[in-house]
Image: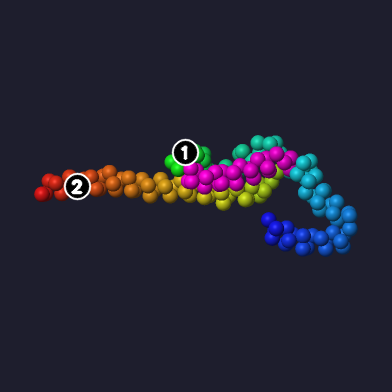
């Protein structure tokens, strides 16, 4: 956080010193806080992202609810904490921009990595855990039956 502040302030403080209080008012208050709270352009209802994000995340959006539930009901607390991090990442950004009056689809770009990791982990576990279960239950069990039959 300190490194980010150092980078941002290293150019913002000289810009404010050169531009004066009007630059500070425009950049900090008008283009940030006022745009978020009042929404001059692209004013949309609070539920706008509920249908915009899933369309943008297709076809993987179909699996996102299952990925949320899968992460919530994992066996160990350590694994659930990893999923909780991704869920909080997704939920905070989604809710933050949903509350804003002005909405654009590109504001939700930071959601895509979290959503992709959630869905990717779901698919990974479905494929590889299922293969292991099939291998243990069918291949090894039938191999053991065959071995007993031969001997």
- Secondary structure category for the residue under label 2: helix
| Residue in the foreground of this view, choosing between 26 and 47 | 26
Q: Position of residue 129 (x, y in %)?
A: 37, 47
* Residue 66 appearing in the image: no
Q: Answer yes or no: is residue 54 visible.
A: yes
- Asked which secondary structure carries label 1, the reply is loop
Does the segment drawn in magenta span residue 93? Answer: yes
- Magenta stretch, main secondary structure class: helix
Q: Quadrant of residue 12?
A: bottom right
The N terminus, quarter of image: bottom right
First to last magenta residue range: 77-102
Viewer-closest of 103 and 144: 144
* Residue at the image point whose x is 83% and y is 63% from the top: 14
Q: Residue furthest left?
A: 151
User: Seen in the image, is 8 located left or right of residue 62?
Assistant: right
Instruction: Give the residue at x 86% y 56%.
Output: 23
In the picture, the disc for residue 144 is 2
Q: Are marks 2 and 1 in contact (CB under 8 Å)?
A: no
- The tag on residue 73 is 1
Which color scheme does this rendered protein use? rainbow
Q: Pick whichever, 13 or 98, lies toward us.
A: 13
Q: Position of residue 151 (x, y in %)?
A: 10, 49
Residue drawn at x 81%, y 53% as measured from the top left: 27
């Amino acid at each position: 956080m300190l490194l980010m502040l150092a980078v941002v302030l290293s150019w913002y403080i000289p810009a404010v010193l050169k531009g004066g209080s009007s630059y500070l008012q425009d950049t900090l208050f008008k283009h940030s806080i006022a745009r978020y709270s009042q929404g001059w352009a692209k004013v949309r209802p609070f539920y706008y992202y509920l249908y915009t994000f899933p369309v943008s995340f297709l076809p993987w959006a179909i699996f996102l609810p299952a990925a949320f539930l899968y992460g919530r009901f994992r066996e160990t607390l350590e694994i659930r904490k990893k999923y909780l991090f991704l869920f909080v990442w997704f939920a905070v950004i989604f809710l933050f921009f949903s509350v804003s009056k002005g909405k654009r689809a590109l504001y939700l770009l930071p959601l895509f990595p979290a959503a992709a990791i959630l869905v990717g982990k779901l698919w990974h576990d479905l494929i590889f855990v299922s293969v292991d279960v099939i291998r243990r239950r069918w291949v090894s069990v039938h191999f053991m039956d065959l071995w007993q039959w031969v001997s």
